[in-house]
Amino acid sequence: MELRKTHIYQYHAEHGNVVDFGGYAMPVWYEGIIAEHKAVRDACGIFDTSHMGRVYAEGPDVVKFLDYVDTNDVAALTDGKGVYGVMCKPDGGIVDDLIVYRMSAEKFLVVYNAGNRAKDFAWLQKNTKGFKVKLTDMSDKVGMIAVQGPKAVEMLAKISATDPGAIERFNVAPLKVSGFDCLAARTGYTGEDGFELFILEDPVATPEKSLKVWNDLVAAGAKPCGLGARDSLRLEAGLWLYGNDIDETINPIEAGLKWVVKMKKPSYFNGRRALEGIIEKGVVRTLLGIQLTERGIPRHGYEVYDGEKRIGVVTSGGVAPTLDESIALAYLPPEYKEPGKEIQVKIRVNLVKGKIVKHHPFYDETKYGWKRVKA
């Protein structure tokens, strides 16, 4: 079966190490994962995110509809603002995480994960019953590029008609980039400052606009980055990966996402009753951060032990280039959440020592990430 191509595929084919990623032809790396990772932490990197799902939701009931499918408070948004949340099943399991941006009172942009594009759109459509709302899948009609790092504003400003730095975090605004009409959202999946660019009216079959924006960013000094660096960056930031750290068998309370579940919003949302019960009863597992204190690399599926007692499984793990340490996320009993508590990760036949650490993010926020203290 032929792999699906994104808006930036032509560049990947010429310069990247392309693999099958959920049915899409995507680059794992160009120069190398470590170099690309460090470019984002220290300067600016760009990622092709055109495989992600993007939908316009429009109509007189659009706010009520989005508040029904999203755990966060969509009604509280004003024009140009966005919010991160999750969609839940009636039992509280996570359908997907997503960002919702308000363009106007009756028009919103919804962005969700690439691997869930078909599933999420079907879920949204299914839940429109009783609401006056229209959904339009724009994924193949709008290019998407993430510009990430402490120099993201500087790089993007070189090819923008106006100052992108005027856009506040988790806000979205029109921006003319390389002469083309775009939307720029001050968000990302790396923990760093930066933007997610939506290149408008650029079909995937003829993606000249997206390729022009990408190549102009490269010429401006941004480093092209692949899936490898995207994963190591999001892991260092303690960000959730759907299919690893969250899925339909996991609820947002145990995933450490209670902060996006707005129980006090007046409208009912999918999964609300189930989540109320989970909060009242308490969870039997919670997502925690692990840092190994001995040599080894923890991977997805590796077992976590306390002595001879198996207490959980690694959901995401690897080497953190910024820290030069091996780190992981794992679901463990809540009594293990105290930082410094010793555990072991089974790597092949060996139990490798580690400890519980703060994981959202793993790094020092005064030195790295969008909250860093600027010199």
Image (cartoon, rainbow, N blue to C red):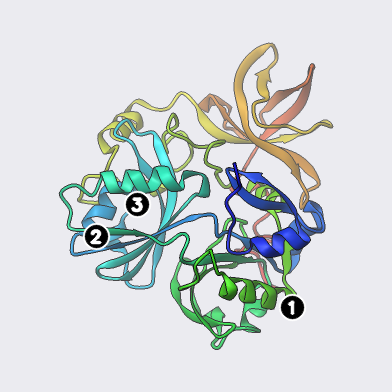
The amino acid beneath tag 3 is Asn
The amino acid beneath tag 1 is Ala
* Residue 150: quadrant of the picture: bottom right
**SS class, disc 3:** loop
52 to the left or right of 134 = right
In which quadrant will I find the N terminus?
top right
Residue 290 in view here: yes
Alpha carbon distance from label 3 to label 2? 14 Å
Which one is closest to the eye, mark 3 or mark 1? 1
Query: Label 2: how many residues lie within 10 Å, few (<14), some (14-19) or many (20+)?
Result: many
| Mark closest to the chain's N terminus, 1 or 2 | 2
Q: Residue 72, labelled with which disc?
A: 3
Alpha carbon distance from label 3 to label 1? 39 Å
Residue 7, percent across and down? 58, 64
| Mark closest to the chain's N terminus, 3 or 2 | 2
Q: Are marks 3 and 2 in contact (CB under 8 Å)?
A: no
In which quadrant will I find the C terminus?
bottom right
Alpha carbon distance from label 1 to label 2? 40 Å
